[in-house]
Amino acid sequence: MSNQESLDAGASSADVRPRPARKAADTVNSPTKGGQGVRPSRTAFIGVAAAALLAGVVIGGVLAHWRDNRPKPFAFVNNAIITRAQFEHALAASAGNQVAQTLTDNTLKMQFLAQQGVLPTAQQIDDKIAEIQKNNPKLIASLPGNHQNMDDLRQQLAISMGMQTLLTQGVTVSNAEVQAFYKQNTDPRTPHALFYKPASVQCEVIACANKTALKAAETALAHGADFGAVAKQYSEDTSKANGGLLPLIIPGSLSPAQYPGMEKLMFSMAPGSQTSGFKCAGHFWIIKCLGRTAPVTVPFAQAQALCQQDALLLKGNQTNGQRVQGELVAFAKKARIISADPAYRLNVGN
């Protein structure tokens, strides 16, 4: 065997001997096959990821700040934007003083009633809300449309219930007084009577200035045209904007001097009927009756509890109203009221 062969054999036998394990750092930094570049260390990878994450946070923060501070729209008018800030500024300019004063007055009233020991409990207010929900659910449903919520209603009830308790302290009403209150509020001659609902009629009208226009409107209706569309085309009454629909008519709604005989004619018509050619107020009228209601009087048995309550409050107001109002004014004048906004000067004792 030659010397070279001996060396090769020695090398082969040396290769099969176990070698000591490399350190992890040496393994990562060792050259790859084919002489390619070194692999990045784990520390370097974490550094790059952290930098990317930090950049993302910064960019996200900038975008969020821009989003939160850009003008918030309230309405769009063609290509123009009315911002929320513009709306709130206009609202404050037109009603800010009134709103600020109302908030102040209501807070003072709540404090005054609490001092007098007549502020209703939360349970009493809940019971009242349940009663309203049963007897007048539309009132509760109308709150969002009036920009109010249940907290607003609860405060209103707390003030009204507390004031009623204060005004009626020491006051009683007899059965005769309750009956008299009921009689007055079922009298058709009493404006806004509580327990009487007058008869009503709902009509659509077309007012034509001459017979030519009247004939054209009648022809269109005879061929099946929509009454509202014909009213918008031919009528000269202001109701044309609503397709000829008039507000609900109750006795006394129409002036006899301005519209002689028209109200009587409307109340004589059957629902669904139509009359044409009625001459009144310088026009020829086409009148369509959409519906009628008869007068309604709430029976005393159904109205008795409310009559008792309202008659008591009316008498209490007459008996204690001036004194209670004076005490409330005196309480308000002692109040310490500071406006944090110099634009609003809050008064007391109103």
Image: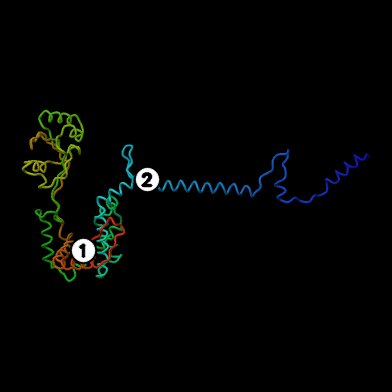
Task: Establish if 256 lies above or below 122.
Answer: above
**Closest to the observer, 50 or 130:** 50
**Residue 216, located in which quarter of the rendered image?**
top left
Query: Outermost residue, bottom direction?
Result: 170
> Which residue is at a point 69% across and 43% down the rendered structure image?
38
Whether residue 288 sits left or right of residue 158 in the image: it is left
Badge 2: residue crowd in 10 Å (few <14, some 14–19, many ≥20): some
> Which residue is at a point 42% across and 46% down the rendered structure image?
67
**Closest to the observer, 281 or 183:** 281
Task: Establish if 186 lies above or below 121.
Answer: above
Identify the residue under disc 1: 349
| Image x and y of residue 136, in percent | 24, 55
Query: Element type at marker 1?
Result: loop
**Closest to the observer, 160 or 270:** 160
**Circles 2, 1 touching at the beta carbon (< 8 Å):** no
| Image x and y of residue 92, in percent | 28, 51
**Three-letter amino acid code at disc 1?**
Gly
| Image x and y of residue 283, in percent | 9, 34
Whether residue 86 sits left or right of residue 228 in the image: it is right
Identify the residue under disc 2: 71
Badge 1: residue crowd in 10 Å (few <14, some 14–19, many ≥20): some
| Image x and y of residue 163, in percent | 22, 65
Q: Mark 2 vs mark 1: which is more N-terminal? A: 2
The quadrant the N terminus occupies is top right
Query: Mark 2 and mark 1: span between their CA atoms?
Result: 40 Å
Residue 135 tag number? none
The quadrant the C terminus occupies is bottom left
Tell me how the rendering is colored: rainbow
**Three-letter amino acid code at disc 2?**
Pro
Query: Element type at marker 2?
Result: loop
